[in-house]
Image: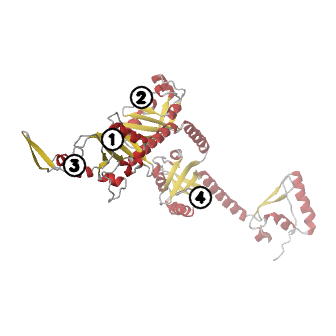
Amino acid sequence: MEVLLTQGHVIMKPYGKAKLYSSSQKIPFDDLFDYLPDAILILDEDLRILMVNKSFIKTFDIGKHQQITGFSLEKLDLSLFRDPSVRDNIDRILLSKTYVNEMLLIEPVKNRIFLTEFIQTTVPSLSFTGKTGIMISFRDITTWKKTEDELKSSERKIRTLFEEVPSGIFMFQEDGTILNANRASLEILGLTRFTDIAHINLFDIMCSREPIERLIKEGKNAEITLTCNFDRVKRTTLVPTSKSGVAYFQVVFAPIIDRRANNPREFFILFLDITQQKRAEKELKERFRGITSNLPGIAYQFFARDSGEWGVYYVDERSDKIYGLSPEPLYNWFDRFTACIAEEDKERWTASIQDVILRIVPWDFEGIFIHPDGKRMYIRGVSQPIRLKNETIWNGLFLDITDRKKAEEELRISEQRFFGIARNLPGIVYQFYVRNTGESGMYFVDERSEELYGISPNPLDSWINRFGSHIAPSDQKRWTDSIEYVIRRNAPWEFEGQYIFFPK
């Protein structure tokens, strides 16, 4: 009954010196032993195998019909028990000496890692003498160990990245207390040690407090540009920075998520010094503004995406001054400009834009623009396309050509007047030239040359010779001498003579 009691098959209640045994309703020890996840082996003092559970059989691939209980440990022939440190530990248990409770053992064949526990025990059901026995359990921690190693490797990589990344990194609390900073952040701020800023609040370094507080409140990833006035920082915080003046930082902000808490209380910013870039952009803008300020128009950048969307990325700030249209808001500037195109030119305007978008070619348009104050202007739009990955960009100019158009109109009217006068003259109007090189010819010959003299005005370069060939032979020398004389003297010319009209 003692054996059944120790195995959990019966329970015992004492009645004085008597004992009452009854069937146990609890799970028997053998059943519980078999369902333990760890592989367990129990040895007696002679190192004979007393018990093994199912997990042990499965873990070490022992055949179902292979009998191992009652046999010596040597017969089991497991590599783990050939380890000298294991055998020595078992001997120390049997001799009741100090021994190691836990060992990490590696099985060389399958490269498995076991957390091995040694327990000195006595099993009355198997040894009524109460002699020492040994229970050894094996827990396979290979996966856990690999995960732990990978985690350590990942942490090591993150630490390396934190220290070696060229961008500055601050980890800070909601109140601006700086928790950590990498080496790059110190270099960017002109510092040498973290202790230089350990007592400084992040808001004291980044001059724009409000944007950071807003990002903290929103708790979302964001990218913004911040400034730092090093002279003010040195004056108010006594930070020993080697930098001076105003610096610009491109900042990536993100909360540090703690899945155990609903609201993040720690954050980090990754920042890059873009001061040189900002200064270069400012200088470039000033140069660009200096160039465009002398143009009778504005520069712009138009885009057409493959998705069908179009609009403008940039409009010269002088848009308001020249065309009465503020550059902002930029997203509808193009629509506002289009609305000012005169009705008689609007269809041609739209068609020209659709055409160049379709063919990706340069654009050139002239038309009438109605200024918001009602003034009619003549404009010319020109641009050149640049094809990018998913869109085409046209960089161009909108020029005010009102003065040119007026001059052309005045010239046209003047020419009409001129031709009207010339038609009533009893001859033709011409323009003769002589250059310092001795070359001579005609710049202009009245179109009535053919009607009156039977000679076409074209080609101009031979008209004077063709006309001279019609001068009567008796007057040829005088004709030639008169021309040479006025050329030599730079004097007015006058000639009378006979002209022979050759019939066609």
The tag earlier along the polypeptide, 3 or 4, is: 3
Rendered view: 281 above or below 442:
above
Assess disc 1: are there few (<14), some (14-19) or many (≥20) residues with their C-alpha within 10 Å of its C-alpha: many
The residue wearing badge 4 is: 364
Give left or right: position of 461 versus 197.
right
Residue 392: percent from left, percent from top: 55, 57
Secondary element at tag 1: strand
Cα separation, mark 4 vs mark 1, equals: 91 Å
The residue wearing badge 1 is: 118
Where, by quadrant of the figure, is residue 174 drawn? top left
Rendered view: 94 above or below 396:
above
The tag earlier along the polypeptide, 2 or 1, is: 1
Question: Among all residues in the image, which is located at the extreme bottom?
Answer: 504
Mark 2 or mark 4: which is in front?
2
The residue wearing badge 2 is: 201
Cα separation, mark 3 vs mark 1, equals: 20 Å
Cα separation, mark 3 vs mark 4, equals: 95 Å
Where, by quadrant of the figure, is residue 496 drawn? bottom right
Q: Which mark is residue 29?
A: 3
